[in-house]
Image (spheres, rainbow, N blue to C red):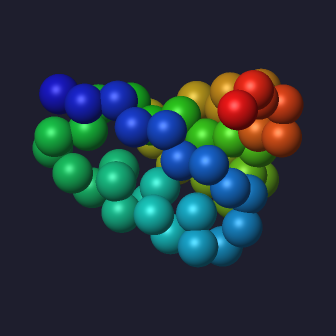
Amino acid sequence: MASVLVVGGGGREHAIAWKLTLSSKVNKIYITPNNIGAALLPQIEFVDLDVNNFEV
């Protein structure tokens, strides 16, 4: 079983997260930033990350 992080809050990311919920190989899906539509999907957990705060 895999855990997957989806980065992005738009419709495309929602579609990716939705499709991942249909996979038997994925047990947990993390999304950042919060995606309101994805809140209704099973296996979804929101992660509060600042994707613009990183060191190169």
Q: Is residue 47 left or right of residue 24?
A: right
Identify the image quadrant of residue 48: top right
Residue 47 higher or lower than 14, as above or below: above
Q: Could you say which is closer to the camera, residue 26 or residue 40?
A: 26
Residue at (72%, 67%) from the top-left corner?
10
Report x, y in % for residue 33: 76, 43
Report x, y in % for residue 30: 53, 34
Q: Is residue 44 left or right of residue 2?
A: right
Residue at (47%, 55%) from the top-left corner?
17
- Whether residue 7 is visible to the viewer of this picture, yes or no, is yes
Residue at (49%, 38%) from the top-left corner?
5
Q: Is residue 50 left or right of residue 27?
A: right
Report x, y in % for residue 1: 17, 28
Q: Is residue 44 left or right of residue 7?
A: left
Residue 5 higher or lower than 6, as above or below: above
- Whether residue 40 is visible to the viewer of this picture, yes or no, is no
Q: Quadrant of the C terminus?
A: top right
